[in-house]
Image (cartoon, rainbow, N blue to C red):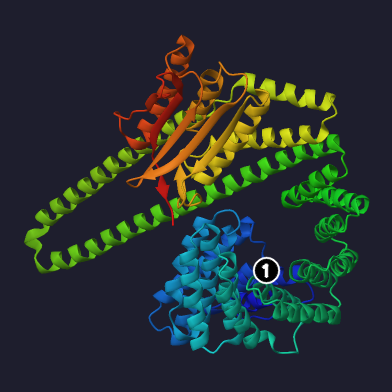
Amino acid sequence: MCPIIKKITLLFVFLFALNVNSQEKKLDSLKNILQTKIPDTTKLQVLANIVNSVESTSKEYSLYNDQFKEIAENLLKQKNLDEASRLNAVSAIGQHYVQKGFQVQYNDYISAIKYLNMSLPYFEAKKHRIYKASVLISLGVLYNKIGSAETATANNFKALRIFEEEKHPSGISYATQTIANLYNDQKKYKEALKFYLKTYDIYFKNEDLLLQDNIQKVLLFKNISKCYQELKDCKLSESYLLKALKLAKEINDFDSISEAYYEMGQFEIVCNANYNKALGYLQNSYSASEKLEKQAKSQISIGKVYIKLNAFDKAEIHLLKGLENGKKIKNLKFQKEATDYLVDLYKAKKQYDKAFEMKELNTLIKDSIKADLNKETLLKKQLQYDYENKEKLNKLLQEKKIDALKLQAQQKEATQNNLLIGLSGALMLVLFGGYFYYRNNKQKQAIDTLEKNQIKQKLLISQMNPHFIFNSIQNIRALINNHQNNEAVDYLDRFSRLTRQILENSNENYISLAEEVEMLENYLSIQQLLYDNKFSYNINVEEGIDQESIFLPPMLAQPFIENGIKHGLSNKLENGKINVHFYLKNDQLFFEVMDNGKGFDTDKKVSQHKSLAMNIIKERLVTYMKNKDFEVQTENLIHPDGTIAGAKVVFEIPYIYEN
């Protein structure tokens, strides 16, 4: 834990000292004091120390924390309580809620947020404003965890204002560093740098710091360096890295030294492309720490540099070690990075069997990472949803409480209206209940409908032809048997990429036009090989269309391209052509595919296949566009002499434009 956080947290504990030798004896002594007849003010101090000494996950903790609040509430009922004792009792209730929040902060973010918010009104007195600011910082951290970055930032700035007004240097430093980290996460490097530098000037400029403070100072230098590097100022980035390395050596903290050397290595790669110098720093990073996490990170980077230097055997040794250590500490990010480089390495060494094996492992790791990210995103959305619902409920309850107070005032002024007011209140409750019951049912129905539609979409998108997969594998085998290893690996890469794209996109309602075009490129190149290059193809996106900003439902075009290849070109042994065109007309996006084959309605199977494809597309587009009159336009292309020159299919694609 950051030493600054520790210092702030200690503010929550009342000063109470006992001259005992061990923590266990101290706790027993405190419990014994509770059994004696002592004033409530003293009892409150004793309970504060017990709560601070007991493990927060134990039943004892909750028991004593509840007693702590109970004694504080009893004190506030006393008529002749002096002002200092009253303020301490008010603060104690706030501390009770803070302790409850800290008790659940790692496994129930929403409850932790609730308790910390409940504590804030008890820290309004001037002497307790530092407590309030500290709680706001903790709330900022929790809001960020549930994906509410805007609320997190607002709380941190409120805390910063209080610390500045109270002229509290360590508090200001803690707040500015937390704000800087938030901006850094959002890739707002200029704003992050501003607050990192402010943190340094306020607290870390001091040379006389404790060991833990100096470790934080090394980290701060590293963060400042990273910001300058992202802002393309390599000179300043290097100067802060050198400061970090120098300080790490002075305090002789091995982990800090390892981290500083690692960042020096990355700097040489990014800013100077000096791989030999980078290699030296990275090897020093590996040697400095015995922690597997830092060793794995260094080993993978060393392997990467050796690849740049064409020292493939050395690269392989380090990458495999990095992969092994990544597995030991169950770090999927390290495992993915190591296998990424190992795939390229084995290709460069022409060890295609190992490249294929590593590619399969890499795919499994990516799937695991994606699953984890999906779970994390879903959890954040759920937590945010739960939090917003609880906030609405709290607001409603508060409104009811205010209404009840108004009702009491009206009852005192005019008792003759009691019956009318009671009936009105009851009616309002019925209306509120009916409204929320109706709204919840409508929301549930909407969610059920959406889920059914999404499942339907996934089933419709997952159309990979088993024959296509089988034929692809057979072609790969044939290439390997003919010793066409480079072609086999290239084909396998395309096939693997296409399969992955189809599986991934089956979970998406919209993908970018660029992703759709890439998927069609892979599909057509594979089909070319399957059909012995009997056709050529061209994919044209109209000039001026921003492919990264236009999002459309995935795989709408593929069935018609497949139809054109399989049936439209079935009469051609060579010189077939498939032309795909995406264009905008009156701000509407259109897809067009043309072939130079035998046209429509010349084969019953073609007609049936075309009809099936149209039905699938129409069903999907009706869901997206809510337009049952949607049509796919088809026509034969005609030569001047009246003979069929091919076929054309055109239809409108619904899209979203994100600028």
In the rendered image, the residue lying farthest to the top is 604
* Label 1: element kind: helix
Where residue 433 sits in the image (x, y, percent)?
A: 26, 45
Q: Image quarter for residue 233? A: bottom right
Where residue 284 sits in the image (x, y, percent)?
A: 89, 68
In the rendered image, the residue lying farthest to the right is 313
Is 401 positioned to the left or the right of 125 in the image? left
Q: In this view, does 550 lie above or below 78?
A: above
Q: Residue at x 82, y 48 (%)?
A: 323
Where residue 410 sits in the image (x, y, percent)?
A: 14, 66
Q: Is residue 397 above or below residue 635?
A: below
In the rendered image, the residue lying farthest to the left is 416
Q: Quadrant of the C terminus?
A: bottom left
Q: Is residue 179 above or below residue 508?
A: below
Label tally: 1
Q: Give the camera-side residue of 334 and 309.
A: 309
Residue under label 1, please give it.
Answer: 53
Where residue 109 sits in the image (x, y, percent)?
A: 54, 57
Q: Give the camera-side residue of 24 and 125.
A: 125
| Residue type of the residue flagged with mark 1 | Ser
Q: Give the camera-side residue of 245 and 233.
A: 233
Q: Can the viewer see residue 43 in this picture?
A: no
Q: Is residue 529 above or below residue 69?
A: above
Q: Residue at x 69, y 88 (%)?
A: 205
Q: Residues within 10 Å of mark 1 (few under 14, many from 20)?
A: some
Q: Can the viewer see residue 89 in this picture?
A: yes
Q: In which quarter of the image is the N terminus?
A: bottom right
Q: Image quarter for residue 23? A: bottom right
